[in-house]
Image (spheres, grey):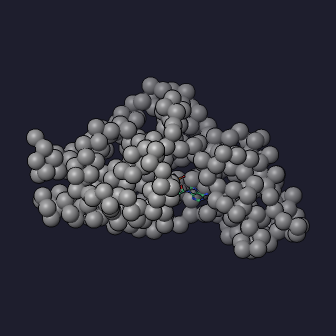
Amino acid sequence: MRLSGITPSGHTQLGNHLGAIARWAAGGGADDLYFVADLHAMTTTHNPAALRARASEMLAVLIAAGIAPERVFVQSDLARELGALTWALECTCSYGEAARMIQFKEKAGGRSGVRLSLLTYPVLMAADILLLGADEVPVGEDQSQHVELARALARRFNSTYGEVFTVPRPVLPLTGARVRDLADPARKMSKSTRDSAGVVFVLDEPDLIRRKIRRAVTDAHSVPAYSPDDRPGVSNLLEILGACTGVTPQEAAAAHTSYGQLKEAVADAVIETLRPIRERTLSLLADPVELDRVRKAGATRAAERGEHRLSSALRLIGAG
Ligand code: AMP
């Protein structure tokens, strides 16, 4: 069983869709679960109302993109279960192990004023994984150390207190497109980038998408060619077009003779790819009663899947 999460640290963007969500919707095992990791979006200064709104929106986007509603849940709906398991796992983890995490060192930068949750969130991530019994966790480079921590904690808990947890292993994420920022192709498109000129959001209106793509940074050439290292801007557009239309970037390059023509084709393809998702998301958000029903059903199902592990873990560690 695979478990993947997406943090509502911003609005869902095209890279999330092409690189992850579209793949999640298209494939995977029947038991796989996907979640909106809203508790993970609280480790730095956050706005509660904005976070709540983004979490609902992201849940709607995942369902609108075609992930079966019974495979999706919002992390905070399992806050009680995850909070309890995080505590048991923190009592299995040393301070040094947590403080060694590269992400913590980078983000904390030695400042003692950072939230304690910045140090402990990898343990919450271990709780996400271990509660649900995921044996495969698709993660990028930046998160693989955290899955190693989850493995170490699962093994230690099992050998110290009793066999409860499946020992997870990190697996490479399903390979999707790597989408770069349109305004700065040196960096990847990200939902938390402050300047959104180069970021296409899944819920952007078609006109805005077209404007952002028309303004995409390219280079001094005029005829499209796929060469990611020395022509990252136009290569990014070709990858996006390829991912949206099911052709290779090279084929996309061969089909266009000017940057202007290519940009219009990319805009058309992105708009048509996102249109049904945008429409379904907006109609889900317009029916909060139905969205809430789906959300509760997903949470109940996920909680049921983890219940026996949580109660065994608490009993074995001596709680209750
Ligand atoms: P994040 O936005 O970091 O929470 O990532 C959620 C998922 O979207 C992960 O599976 C990422 O690998 C994927 N993702 C995020 N940004 C991009 C991007 N620019 N290109 C491709 N995949 C992305």
Q: How many marks?
A: 0
**Relative to 233, is 320 above or below?**
above
Task: Identify the image quadrant of the N terminus.
Answer: bottom left
Residue at horizontal 85 percent and vertical 59 percent from the top: 261
Foreground of the two, 135 or 139: 139
Taking the spot 30% from the left edge, 57% from the top edge, the residue there is 95
Q: Can residue 31 be seen here?
A: no
| Image quadrant containing the C terminus | top left
55 up-or-down from 132: above or below:
above
Q: Quadrant of residue 265?
A: bottom right
Residue 236 image point, x, y percent: 71, 63
Residue 17 as seen in the image, left or right of residue 92: right
**Which residue corresponds to the image point at 68% horizontal and 70% vertical from the top-left?**
248
**In the picture shown, does residue 92 fall above or below 54?**
below
114 or 148: which is nearer to us? 114
The quarter of the picture where residue 39 lies is top left
Ligand 1 position by quadrant: bottom right
